[in-house]
Image (cartoon, rainbow, N blue to C red):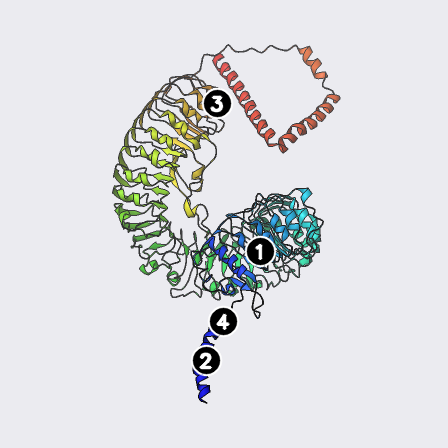
Amino acid sequence: MKLLHVFLLVVLPYLNLALSSSGVGEHAETIRCIERERQALLNFKRDLIDDEGRLSSWGSTKDCCKWEGVHCSNHNTTTSHVTMLDLHTTDDYLLYKPLRGKISPSLHELHRLRYLDLSFNDDLYGPIPQQFSNLSNLRHLDLRGNYMLNIENLDWLSHLSLLSHLDLSMVELSKATGWVQTISNLPLLKELHLSRCSLPDITPSSSFCSNSSVSLSFVDLSFNSLSSSIYNWLFNFSSSLAYIDLGYNELKGSIPDAFGDMLSLTILSLSWNQLEGGLPKSFANLSHLQSLDLFYNNLTEELHEFLQKVSGAKNSLESLDLSSNRLKGPLPDFTRFSLLRALYLDNNSLSGSFPKDIGSFPSLVYLSLSGNQITGSFPDLSVFPSLQTLDLENNQLNGTIDKSIGQLHKLRVFSCAFNLLNGTISEAHFSNLSSLWYLDFSYNALTFKFSSDWIPPFQLDVIKFSSCKLGPHFPKWLRTQNKFSMLDISSNGIAGNIPSSFWDLSPGFKYLNLSHNQINGLLPDLSLKVQGTLPWIDLSYNLLTGPVPPIPPSLAFLNLSKNKFRGSLYFLCANTSGRWLIYLDLSNNLLSGELPYCLSRLKTLAFISLAYNNLYGEIPISIGSLSQVRILNLRSNNLSGEVPAWLGTNLTSLMVLILRSNEFNRSIPRQLCQLNRIQILDLSQNHLSGNIPPCFSNFTSLVESNYYDYNYGPYAGDGGDGFTYVANAFVQWKGQDQEYGKNLRLLKTIDLSSNKLSGKIPEQVGSLAGLHSLNLSRNTLTGKIIQEIGQMKMLESLDLSANKLSGEIPGSLAHLNFLSVLNLSSNNLSGEIPLSTQLQSFNASAYSGNPNLCGLPLPNKCLGDPPITPQPKDKSIQEDEDRSITQGFYVSMGLGFFFGFWGVFGTILFNSRSRHAFFMFLNHITDWIYVTIALNWARLQRRL
């Protein structure tokens, strides 16, 4: 027994040490990862920058099978190969940061790799290692969203013969000319995703592939620039393809019949192409078709004929998108498609009313018919019990809205804006609409009447009631809607104060439009109440008074024009006021004081209008730091001093500069000529002196006929939430002040009238071929009207009146075919008014006050040539000529007219250049006839 104790005390500690050192102990780490593959992964990691720490586990343990994103095979064996590497990044970059760097060629050591996903690591760059061709066991490869990768060819792909899933979407492949042949040589490929890859178009010779994969069932080639030559390649897989997306390409002509041979087809998208005509009859063979998307093409078929051709899918079709085509005819009965869930027919030429005898349609969930010419009364919606989205806007529906809408308890989105609907909307219309979140009744003659204590069953996100009748009081039920992101109740006859509780806006607030009402009172401090992301507020055309409160720091758009606000502009100087402001319109108020220097803080401003106020002093140089400004409107104030030269050197993005009706003096700075994007320049009604700068020819956008967009920043055009950033301004056009909104960008004008400018009109002004209006009136300009004025082909309005111009009116002025307003009065012009259709069509007042000017339309007669006396023709000769007009002559004349008419007008009809040349010729002929008649009439008058 003693010997046993000695053994345990002496031998056992050494035995435990031996066991622990050999890794057989209780806590020993089991290593299944092959060392060669472990090193390959570590080398891969060394070439990456991991900002998120996603690869922090790599190297922390010896077993790479336990590392993040790494999966191995044969979990029950002592060694395992890496079979799966999944390091994809979600497209929500706020949650995860992508990996950065190059893809190491060391991955080729993972010979057993079957699954590789590096998608949406959009900071990966460089070429795909050619060693990838060694990954012969790869079944799944996903590199989508890595647009910085450089792939010049896909030769390495041809060695991946076991590949079944390939996704290279959003990877630049414009140089991969042989992509068709490579893809065709992957015998087991089932899914192909090559969307947004800038794929080179294929040639007809490369479209036939004798050894094509028979397993290819899914193809997404959308958002490329592929032509119709892609069809023949796809038709090699007619028996297997079930999903085809060719949307957003350059497909032209008719839809091929061969699509009807793809009997396995379930999803087909040919949207946003240039397809014409109708649907081939062969589509009746597609009995498994579930979704057909032909959005935004030029299809012109009758709708009922189109539906007849897809009737083979009446028991399978779930989604049909034919929007933005030119389909015509009345609405047919769709109930034959028993599984149809989504029907989009918006923006076509459909007419007629809703079918009266339409049966129950329980499957329909989404119905869009907007942008057609559908007439008649509002339909009975009880036949669509499952509707979630109903869009009927921009049609010609009339009468009242049927209360059956209240039965659609699943309805979430409803719009009937821009129709001819009238009547009253009551609580009964919304009784069961607890799921409703988007509601648009805009631009109808609808009156809303609810009880004062009504609490809606819904919480709306979007509320659009513009140009309806909610007033005269601010609707109480709106106070219950505390989660809306968009509210438009403009032009609703609402008067009185806005309840203070209304301004507790939700954090998701984006857009508020209360304009064109009679809302009065003070505007509260919204700087702590508006917390949305770059929201808009439009309170213009109301009766709001008092000082303007500090602007919320996150606000992007603020329109307070046409109110009665008083005080200075120093509210803009608050620490965080308007930090992200893009659009600021405070025009037509009672604001006073100087322009504050703190305006320089508003770095993102693109539109500034402070017109029609009582502002005075000079324009501070701090405005020169607002380099993003497109429109600056300071008209009708009391601003003084020189027009700053830095407007031209610093604000180079300016497209509209209006300083009209102020007290500016001195000369026009030549630096303004650096505004090469300027389209509207109005310096009229000031005290400017000196010459007109000859460098006006540097105004590139006035020389060209193209237009630029005033919109700027994240709200360029449609904001995506149903509201649009529209720059607007009052512009002097053809002698009248007119407000322009959407069409403002189409105007190109220069107005220097009512100043003290002197000297000659520079010849360089004639180079402004894109200019629409030129007003130099009421100055002291001398010299002649420049001959180059005839080069200003787009000119519609020309006012040179009340100057000291002399000499003759240049004949080139008669070449301005678009000229509709002309005023040359009160000058020292002389000679005869050039004869043309245009110049004689103006009132005589356009030329009055020029005592030495003569000719039509003035009553002053010019000394003309002696009248031409026509020689009488011999009567016998006349009779002989009459007798020569025989029956054969009339037959010949008829044949000549027929062939001549179609020879000329057929060319005009089908050839745009010939058509343009003909009408220019016709215009000259008309001018010649008019001048001839006017000249002879003048001579006859002088004889009398």
Identify whether 692 is placed above or below 438: above
Residue type at the position of mark 1: Leu
Q: Is residue 197 visible?
A: yes
Marks 1 and 3, how far apart in space? 69 Å
- Foreground of the two, 244 or 344: 244
Numbered disc in front, either 1 or 3: 1
N-terminal label among 3 and 4:
4
Q: Which residue is mark 1?
A: 141
For mark 3, does the 10 Å Cα neighbourhood hold few (<14), some (14 to 19), or many (20 or more) residues?
many
Residue type at the position of mark 3: Ala
Q: Which residue is mark 2?
A: 12
**Residue visible at 32% across and 43% down?**
588
Q: Which residue is mark 3?
A: 814
N-terminal label among 2 and 4:
2
N-terminal label among 1 and 2:
2
Identify whether 114 is placed above or below 657: below
Residue 131, position in %: x, y? Answer: 57, 51
Residue 59 is left or right of residue 826, and the answer is right
N-terminal label among 2 and 3:
2
**Residue visible at 49% across and 19% down?**
835
- Foreground of the two, 329 or 694: 694
- Foreground of the two, 380 or 556: 556
Numbered disc in front, either 2 or 3: 2
